[in-house]
Image (cartoon, rainbow, N blue to C red):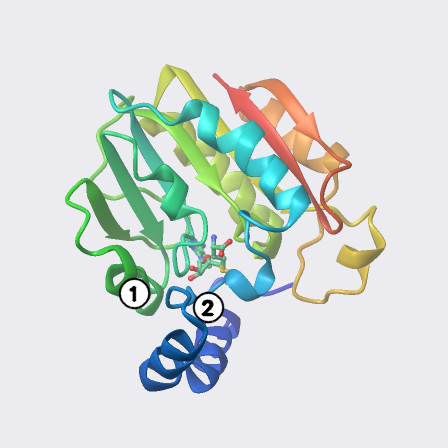
Amino acid sequence: MPPLDTSMHLDMLARWRQKNSFTRRAIRTIRAGFPLPLYGLEWGDPDVVEPLRFIKERYVLPYVNAQHDAVEIGPGGGRWTRYLLGFRTLTAVDYHPELLDELKRNFGSHRNLRFIKNSGTDFPGLDPRSIDYVYSFGTFVHLDFNLIEAYLKSIRTIIKPTANVVIQYSDKTKIMAQINEGFSDNTPARMRAAVDAAGYRILEEDTTSLWHSSVIRFAI
Ligand SMILES: C[S@@+](CC[C@H](N)C(=O)[O-])C[C@H]1O[C@@H](n2cnc3c(N)ncnc32)[C@H](O)[C@@H]1O
């Protein structure tokens, strides 16, 4: 499993940038007439790929509220950030400043979007009990289980009693997670137990839509 200081995320970004320099993207855009691709769309576009579209429509869009404040953990290039911009504030929290820079390049003009570089499991600068919605996709699938447990503890400190937390995590009961060495050692049973032990109520789970992972929604 990748440790916190893994170079995996920076390597993936570097490989993508090599194939997608601004000039190359601009040429492709002019030729094909579509918008500049975001880093991350190569893992599936939630506007196009059916299971991701389902996750977006079930676990993301219904919660977007202009009177609410949200946090996205591990936003990458902003594949999911795009759908969260309707919150009053959206705080993008990432361990890698390089990834926050990539997000800024794509969405830096949005005045309600804030960027926080963290130490791996914390939320520096966020007030206690201030957040209505937490979302993370493509990030917990790679986190060692002790980091997931630490995140569950620290998420609890920043959310309101009415908040919803939606996390997608690695599901090693599925073959596509088993063959991916970058996916952490997790299952719905293990995740449920950790969420429960951290003092949350599980509200909803999806263990069937995604091919290598599962999704859980919970609250205090
Ligand atoms: C594979 S990318 C997924 C990006 C995006 N959520 C998506 O689905 O396209 C993983 C993201 O998590 C970030 N990340 C890795 N470890 C993290 C941690 N401990 N806390 C917060 N972000 C982390 C990486 O820098 C990167 O932005």
Residue for point 31% across, 60% down: 103
The residue labelled by disc 2 is 5
From this view, report whether residue 16 is shown above or below residue 159.
Answer: below
Residue 6 shown left or right of residue 115 in the figure: right
- In percent of width and height, residue 35 lies at 38, 64
Residue for point 25% across, 44% down: 124
Residue 150 shown left or right of residue 77 in the figure: right
Residue for point 42% across, 64% down: 38
Callout count: 2
The residue labelled by disc 1 is 97
Regarding residue 3, the answer to whether it shows in the image is no
Of the residues under marks 2 and 1, which one precedes in the sequence? Answer: 2
The residue tagged with tag 2: helix, strand or loop? loop
Q: Quadrant of the N terminus?
A: bottom right
The residue tagged with tag 1: helix, strand or loop? helix
Q: Amino acid at mark 1?
A: Pro
- In percent of width and height, residue 39 lies at 44, 66
